[in-house]
Image: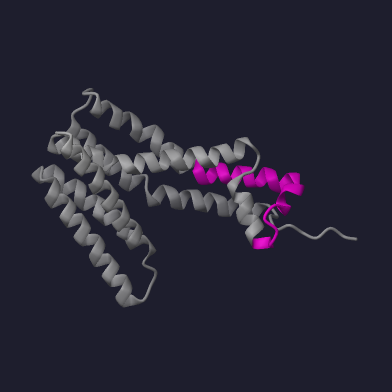
Amino acid sequence: MVEAAVPTVLFTVVFLTTRDLKLALVISLAAALLALAVRVVQRSSVQFAVNALLGIGIGALFAARAAKGGGTADEQALAYFLPGLLYNAGYAVVLAFSNIVRWPVVGFMVGSVTGDPTGWRSDRQIVKLCSLLTWVLVAPCILRVVVQAPIYLAATNGLMDTGLAVGILGGCKLVMGWPLQIASLAAMAWLLSRNATPLEEQPA
């Protein structure tokens, strides 16, 4: 989780202090690569480090696209945060839709454990619980979009200073990243502890 936070902090701080987008990207990328190397040496999971590298790479592509369009350094830095917003919006739409059509995504997770992908659908209580768990799972994504999208749009439409928006988005990405996700998972664990989720065989 640190692997995801440190590059974001470094990118935001370096850019705001130097207004050098390339330097900010290089330093954040170097931090992510260092974290990956440490994980490899420790022989521990590299998932978070790889995710950080992918995030930086995609953000850099969006920043480069803004540069080709004649965007200023501030506008390029702002574009760096757009992929995260799009990802959260897409994730929120998919999970929310699965609940609306009463095929909550968490239900398929339950099905993967029981060995029957759709068996959970036969139990109304499990469907209800899975729907609730899916809402809890998607809540961080919805909250991120609700908070960050207006800031991004205000900056792109000239209603907010772009440099200020970059700083706020950097802070939001840090505070609303893993801390919010951990809170969501903790809430899911609490709900699971209060409800019997495994599908039980009906007595003959």
Left or right, residue 57 beside residue 22:
right
Q: Is residue 108 above or below residue 135?
A: below
- Percent x, y for residue 172? 31, 41
- Percent x, y for residue 163? 17, 35
- The residue most toward the right is 204
**Residue 117 magenta-highlighted:** yes
Residues shaded magenta: 113-138
- Percent x, y for residue 160? 22, 26
- Percent x, y for residue 111? 66, 56
Q: Main secondary structure of the magenta part?
A: helix
**Residue sitting at x 64%, y 37%:** 101
- The residue most toward the front is 68
Q: Is residue 119 above or below residue 150?
A: below
Q: Tell me the quadrant of the picture where the C terminus can be found.
A: bottom right
**Residue sitting at x 30%, y 39%:** 82
Query: How are the residues colored?
Result: one colour
**Residue sitting at x 64%, y 50%:** 107
Left or right, residue 150 beside residue 126:
left
Q: Tell me the quadrant of the picture where the N terminus can be found.
A: bottom left
Q: Is residue 70 above or below residue 125?
A: above
**Residue 152 magenta-highlighted:** no
**Number of dots carrying numbers:** 0
**Residue sitting at x 32%, y 71%:** 39
